Image (cartoon, rainbow, N blue to C red):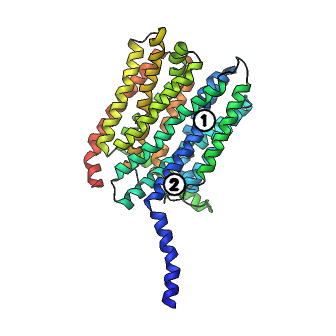
Amino acid sequence: MDSGDSRREQSPLIVDNLEIRTPKDYTRDVHILSCAFLLIFLAYGAAQNLETTVNTEGNLGTISLGILYLSFTCFSLIASLVVRVLGSKNALILGTTGYWLFVAANLVPSWYTMVPASFYLGFAASIIWVGEGTYLTSAALSHASNRNLPEATVIGSFNGEFWGFFASHQFVGNLISLAVLRDNKEGSTSGTTLLFIVFLCSMTLGTILMCFLHKEDGKGEKGPVDSSVNFYSHILSLLKSITTLLLDIRMLLIIPLIAYSGLQQAFVWAEFTNKIVTPALGVSGVGGAMAVYGAFDAICSLAAGRLTSGLSSITFIVSGGLVVQAIVFLWVLLKYSLTSGVLGTLYPLLMAALLGIGDGVLNTQLSALLGLLFKHDTEGAFAQLKVWQSASIAVVFFIYPYISLEAMLIIMLTGIFVSLVGFLFLTLLVEKAFYFSSS
């Protein structure tokens, strides 16, 4: 009887353990995370694209975005601590509230609604992105361990799926904007009000979906800090993490590439849509151009993720993406001029496609690279990613009214050169150590 009871008591534990460790659970969580981010960011991305168009009084839209990304930069410094205390799943869910409030503020846009919502979204964005990077990397490492697969391949595959879904938010969100605002009359707010209500519904579904994620990351799943000693130990750990990463030559060589990835995103949102697409296609054509951008971004993210197998493949893919974007910047700087007819419509769409390819490459490969090189401090590494990305974006939004397109293009080309040199030097520096540790 004792042995039979013992077996009955032990068997549920064995089943539970198998359920936790089955690889199928990790891929399920990647599907859920990808779909949730698509639902949330198809709303936020399209709303962000409309900010400088619908909130023009006193440059409310532009200033709100600048405040948002400045707040994002500052809070990213402590985001890793917040994620460690809350756990990555809880951080993901809390992070969605900032996006919801920002879109809701657009229903009654004013300095009293948009500025506080933008500031809070900076905090929410910092923890949702550090939580995403931590959760996805941990799931990939666990899946690779269970299946005896190369870590680089699984990390690349998981990031490819996630960023493929995420990139498609530009395509889906802008198509929704086009459909809802198609018959909207000049000066009418009824269409934008309906659009933002639709976006809030989408975000709510995404938040609900996020609740079905498993707490399987194995890192950061800690309860609230319950003593001052523990709190100060977390602060010291955070400061040590930031200092250690900033003294790590690998991170220093990656930072220019991270900063450039933020610059190129802000260039598309601010400069490209307003100074290239709008003169050629009109305001109504912005949604179509961004849909093309999002479609190629998504396709390239999926393809780049599948092709990722290690540092060599990451180097090749990133270099190709940077060259593609450099071609666009040189084209606009040296040869492009506004034309009429079919070519006048085709050129901005072709540029949007090429810029989307570059963005898809940078998103997937930067996440995979950080996951591979800093898997013992993923929260800190992804916090650094968002610090430098958001700082670059904030700078562009604040200087946008005062800088010419030509000057911005020179900055972008300089950014490509510096980041590519640093990245190639990183490859030479760590390639042998990387393969040794993964073999």
Crowd class of label 1 (few under 14; some 14 to 19; many from 20; radius 10 Å)? many
The residue nearer to you, when weighing 137 against 222, is 137
Which residue was labeled with disc 2?
236
Task: Compute the Cα span from label 1 to label 2.
Answer: 35 Å
Which residue was labeled with disc 1?
44
Q: Is residue 379 visible?
A: no
Name the disc covering residue 437, or none: none
Residue 422: horizontal and vertical position, in percent?
Answer: 33, 35
What is the number of callouts on the image?
A: 2
- In the rendered structure, which amino acid carries the disc numbered 1? Tyr
Residues tagged 1 and 2 counted as in contact (Cβ below 8 A)? no
At horizontal 38% and vertical 51% (from top left) the residue drawn is: 154
The image quadrant that residue 278 belongs to is top right
At horizontal 49% and vertical 45% (from top left) the residue drawn is: 383
On screen, residue 42 versus residue 309, left or right, reads right
- As displayed, is residue 372 above or below residue 229? above
Q: Is residue 37 visible?
A: yes
